[in-house]
Amino acid sequence: MYTRDATYNEEEGSVRMFLRGRPINLYAPTAEIATYDITKVATAPSSKLKLDWVYPFLLYGYRGKDCRSNLYLLPTGEMVYFVASVAVLYNVEEQSQRHYLGHTDDIKCLTIHPNKLLVATGQTAGHDNHEGKPHIRVWNSVSLATVVVLGLGEFERSISCLSFSKADGGSLLCAIDEGNDHNISVWDWQKNEKGHKITETKCSMDTVVAAEFHPLERNQIVTCGKGHISFWTLDAGGTLYKRNGIFETTRDRPKYVTCLAFTQNGDILSGDSNGSVVIWGRGTNNILKVARNVHEGSVFSICVLKEGSIITGGGKDGKLIQFDTSMHPTGYEAQIAEHLGGIRTVSEGRGSQLLVGSTRNCILIGSLSMGFSPAVLGHTDELWALCPHPTLAQFLTAGFDRIVQLWDSLSRSVVWSKDIAEQAQSAAFSIDGRIIIVGCVSGKWIVMNSETREIYSTHIDGNEPIQVAKFSPDGQLLALGSRDNYIYIYQVSDGARNYTRLGRCTCWEDKRRRRCSTGAIIDKMSGHSSFITHLDWSKDNEHLRSNSGDYELLYWKVKVCRQVTHSTQLRDTVWASNSCVLTFSSIGIWPEGADGTDVNACERSNGSKLMATGDDFGKVKLYSYPVKQPKSLCHVYGGHSSHVTNVTFLHDDSRLISIGGKDTSVLQWEII
C-alpha cells in the first residue's frame, strides 16, 4: 500500500487507496465529507506507553525451549533472563520488573560479568538493515545503560553463546556465531568505543551449544556441542589453538555434549545426551571419570554450588540430583512436575535456593529439601488469542500450545491455566465476563466458565481455524469469523451457555440466482472471497463489518446473514469497536509500502481516544483516534522480536496488552 497515492473524492466522500494494486474505497461519515482534508498530518497522541510488565511466557518470561545458561541471580536480588528482545530483571519477592530494551530482535544468549554488575546479551538477525544485524550488547544491570555494542555487522546469523573471562577479572568476552562455520571470536570489549576483536576462527562444523572461559586458567576456553567438546588456548599473539576431547570408547562418545561447568579445583564437568556426567582433568583433554546414567535422557544443566556440591538437571526425567565434589550422590534429589517440563538450566539463588528454568518455559524457585514452585509459567508455541475481561483488570491468552491462561494485570500473575487439548486461534468474553469462547484451529469452538474453567460445550463450524470471535454489544448474538471465508452467527441464551445457529454470512462461492431486467437468469455473487481476519459489531447490534485476507471491507445485516452491498448506507453507523484494520477511521495505520499483511491487529481504546496496532516487525504503535489521515504520526515501541499478533486495551484503558507470535511474548504496557 502507498498511502501517499491515496485520493479523496469530495463528491462521494470517499478515500481511495491501493493495497497490492487492489483499490479500496473507504467512506467518510456524512458530517466529515465537506471538511475532510487528506493532506492534513495527524499528530501523535499525548498519551504514551511504558513497558509495565513482561508476562512470563515462553520467549517472554523465560526462553527454555531452545536456549540455555540464561537464568541468573544478581546481587540486587533480581533474576535476569530474556524475553523476546527484552532482558528482564525480575524481583520475585517485591513482584517488580525492570527491563533492558537495547536489542532489536530475539536475544539468544546471556552471560554475567565476574563483577556481577555487567551483563552481556547477544541477539539474532532482525528486521532492520543496520541495527537489526546480529550483535552483542554489554550493559549495566543497575542503571540499564548500554556500555558497548560489539560486532555490529560482523556476525553471520546470531550469537548463540557468550562468556566473560574469569581469571583476569573479565577483560575478555568470548562469542559463538550460529553461522555455518560456528565461528568462535574473542573480544577485548573495553578497547575503543566499539571494542576490539582479538581473534576469530572456525569452531566446529557442527552445532555449538556452550562456550565458557575457565575460571582459574587465563586464556583457556571450553566449547561443546554436537559430537564434541573442545579445549581452547588463546596465546599471547592472539591466536586460538584447539584440542578436542578424547573419548576413551565409542560408548562414551555422545551424540551431544549438552552443558559445561567447573569444579572448585578447576576440573571440567560436561553433561551429555547419554545421561552421563564426564569429569575432564584441568589443563588436559582427557577424561578423569565418567558417571553414567545420571539421568534418563540428556543432562541439560550442571551447577556447582559455592560450597562445592554439584547439582545436575535432566531434560527428559525432570529430576534435580545432588552430588558431592567427587560425583558421588548425596541422596538429595527433586522431581519437577511433568507438566512444567524438563530441566533446562540450574543456577544458584539466595541461601539454599536454586533457580530452575524448564523446557516448557517455566522458572521455578526452591530447594532439594523443600521442593520447587513456579515463579513463572509459560506458553510453548505461537500466541494468537487475546481478549480483555469486560469489567475486571484481567485478560485471557491462548495459542498453539493448547493452553488457555487467565491473567490478572494488577497482581501480575496467572489466575488459572487450562489445557483444552486444541490449538487456540481466537477468544472472547461474554458481556458479563462469566463465559469464555475459545476458537480453535480445527474449526471447533469451546464454551467455558471463566471462573471454574468448566467446559460447558464444544461446537464445530467447518474444518478451518476460527479466526475471530465477538459477542454483540447486548450479548444476545455471537459472530465467528472463519478461515473458510464464512461468518457464522449464533443466538445466545441461558447466560451465554447455549447457542443456536441463525445462519452464516454467504461467501464468494455461494451464488444467488435471479432474473435481470431482460428476463435472463444471472448469478449474483456476494460475500468474502478470502478468509475472515477481523470483525466489528455496530452499537445497535444490527450490523457487522469484516475484513478478509484479500483486503476487503464488507458489511452485513446480521439477522438475515446478508451482505449490505451499498456500503454508503452504513457510513454513519456507530461501531462498538474498531478491530478491523481496513476502515475509514484506521486509514493512517498503514505505513508506506505495506503489503496488506504487515498490520496484524488494531484496537480502539474503550474511551475512543487512542488506537493501538501490532505489526509484522515486532512493533506496537499508538495513535490518536480516529486515524483517518494517511499521514498520521504515532509513538512506536519495541519489545517483541517476532510479529505482534494481537493488541487490546484493558476495560478501563489503564493498560495495553500485546502478544507476539513465534516469540509467544505477552507485554503489558502502562498508558501514561
Image (cartoon, helix red, strand yellow):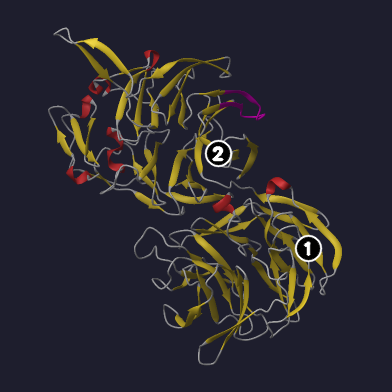
Query: Which image quarter is the N terminus in?
Result: top left
Residue 85: where, in percent of width, then height? 48, 58
In the image, what residue type sits under mark 1? Asn
Residue 75: where, in percent of width, then height? 65, 68
Residue 75 in view in this figure: no
Decide if residue 98 is on the left or right side of residue 267: left
Question: Residue 629 appears in which quarter of the rendering?
Answer: top left
Q: Reply yes or no: does residue 449 show up in magenta.
A: yes
Disc 2: which residue = 398
Q: Which mark is residue 11?
A: none
Circle 2: element type:
strand
Camera-side residue of 591 and 572:
591
Residue 345: where, in percent of width, then height? 67, 61
Residue 328: where, in percent of width, then height? 85, 70
Check the image and report above or below for 574 versus 116.
above
- Which residues are drawn in magenta? 446-458
Circle 1: element type:
loop
Disc 1: which residue = 293
Q: Residues within 10 Å of mark 1 (few under 14, many from 20)?
A: few
In the image, what residue type sits under mark 2? Ala
Camera-side residue of 491 and 343:
343
Q: Main secondary structure of the magenta part?
A: strand
Decide if residue 227 is on the left or right side of residue 492: right
Decide if residue 544 is on the left or right side of residue 103: left
- Residue at image position (54%, 32%) is 389
Q: Reply yes or no: does residue 119 show up in magenta.
A: no
Q: State the separation of the CA atoms marked 2 and 1.
A: 38 Å
Which tag, 2 or 1, sits closer to the chain's start? 1
